[in-house]
Image: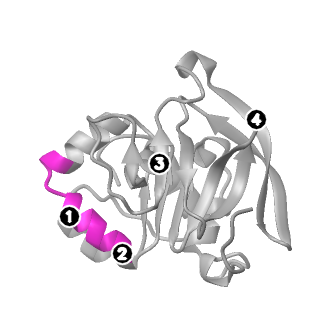
Amino acid sequence: MELQGDYALHHQIFGVMEIESVPVKKSSDLNNIDGLVIPGGESTTISLLIDNFNMYDSLVEFGIENPVMGTCAGMIMMANTVDDKRINPLRLVNIDVERNAYGRQIKSRTEFVQFDFNDKHKVVLPTTMIRAPRIKEINSDIKVIGKYGHSPIAILSGHHLCLSFHPELDQVDIFHRVLFDPQSEIYYKKIDQYHVA
């Protein structure tokens, strides 16, 4: 989605994957795609633009049937509730989110975190968090893929993937492959039964 944020780097990852990606700037653009990335950026601005461009209902309807990935601010937009009344979340995933929970932008950092997709796919990856949101509450049918400390930072809920961080900044493509690449060994439809890790 190209309303605001770091969408260009997501396009680059899809290019490497040889998956066509197109701009989504209005509701009618959703008719031409099979999946959506809501990128990092400023969540209050993204929420305002979604409302100003009358995209809210179309995004919710799209998300019911299609895979959606949210990174950082995108995860905030996908949440059920957010601790900021200026944001009107899409409520695609049953999580409660706290904005900027890991500190201000000056405290942004890259950590190495282990991600467990299933028994066969466990990997340690660079994980860049910029004013990262924290998942405060999580439903029991959601699969936790990765944690930072005791808090989940990567979760899979059906065909929705939420990340507190920015994999595109580190050119990490495994999360895009999980959700959007049917040829991938860890495509979401092949992942084991969801459970809280």
Residue at image mark 2:
64
Callouts 3 and 4 close, C-beta under 8 Å: no
Looking at marks 1 and 3 on the same chain, the residue that comes earlier in the sequence is marked by 1
Numbered mark located on residue 96 in the image: 3
Residue 36 image point, x, y percent: 41, 64
Looking at marks 4 and 1 on the same chain, the residue that comes earlier in the sequence is marked by 1
On the picture, is 168 further left or further right than 31?
Answer: right
Residue at image mark 4:
111
Gap in angstroms between the C-alphas marked 3 and 2: 19 Å
Q: At x 59% / y 70%, what residue is drawn?
A: 141
Gap in angstroms between the C-alphas marked 1 and 3: 20 Å
Answer yes or no: is residue 124 visible: yes
Residue 8 image point, x, y percent: 45, 47
Toward which corner of the image does residue 140 lie, by quadrant? bottom right
- In which quadrant of the rendered image does the N terminus lie? bottom left
Q: At x 67% / y 60%, what residue is drawn?
A: 144
Q: In this view, does 53 lie above or below 67?
A: above
- In which quadrant of the rendered image does the C terminus lie? bottom right
